[in-house]
Amino acid sequence: MNIDLNCDMGESFGAWVMGDDAGVMPWVSSANVACGFHAGDFMTMQRTVALAAEHGVAIGAHVALPDLQGFGRREMMLSPDECHGATLYQIGALAAIVRAQGQRLHHVKPHGALYNMAAKDAKLAEAIAHAVRDFDPQLILIGLAGSALPHAGAQLGLTVAHEAFADRRYREDGSLAPRREADAVIHDVDVAVAQAVQIATRGNATTREGDAVAIRADTMCVHGDRADAALFAQRLHAALQRAGVGIGRVVAQ
């Protein structure tokens, strides 16, 4: 068994600091770098790309809705054409920094509200997938396991990675419990690590009702905005290895 560990990074902005990227980076295989819409700025992007390159971590564009104030977690009404353009804009910005540092962009993963919208809205999913293909058909598209986004990417011939979450509760249909619900995020590290191992080794997660829901996991998210993100990433990395799960980036087909 093999799985990619990805983390949302580069989410600081100006003098405002978010996350412990340096502490997390040694324990993951892919970094999703904020492109300035929900978080991040050009200097943070440069630093995060350099840190990922130092650790041999795959670099991806973490594209989002233009919502700095809401950290990209508020839904906005974008047409498919607007979504396509916004996705291209952000990929291009990060790709310039990646190229200047002699690296190669590896993947694209939407953030927050855009991620959840594209998991359900086929038109938005198609717009994002088209933008990825239009920029570089070798890029890997990451989306919620079993949702509209990886389906749209696969339909266009992209390599897709179905994503699971260690620290989020699942509903019976395989969707994530909304963050507005009190127990949507698993804060206890032991519980989150146990769920991750279950998903990676058994291919399912346990819902709040106690039922098992099938979850495909090519990649698993480590949320970089957790206060204990570095500890969580280290514990998760070690637990997966003890369970016989190898850790490495997704490879384009």
Image (cartoon, helix red, strand yellow):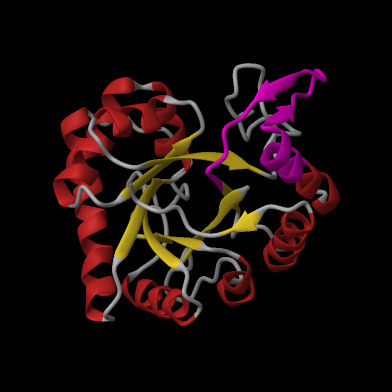
Q: Which of the pair 248/186 is nearer the observer?
A: 248
Q: Would residue 213 be seen by someone viewing this image from the given angle?
A: yes
Q: Position of residue 125 (x, y in %)?
A: 31, 30
Q: Is residue 163 above or below residue 89?
A: above
Residue drawn at the location 47% of the way across and 47% of the way down? 70
Q: Position of residue 196 (x, y in %)?
A: 71, 44
Q: Is residue 200 above or below residue 106?
A: above
Q: Is residue 18 above or below residue 161?
A: below
Q: Based on the displayed image, in which of its 4 quarters is residue 248 positioned?
A: bottom right
Q: Position of residue 24 (x, y in %)?
A: 62, 69
Q: Position of residue 106 (x, y in %)?
A: 34, 59
Q: Which of the pair 177/53 is nearer the observer?
A: 53
Q: Is 217 in the magenta?
A: yes
Q: Would residue 227 be seen by someone viewing this image from the given angle?
A: no
Residue drawn at the location 63% of the way across and 57% of the way down? 246
Residue drawn at the location 33% of the way across and 47% of the way down? 253
Q: Is 231 in the magenta?
A: no
Which contiguous range is marked in magenta? 195-219
Left or right, 19 with respect to 94, comes to right
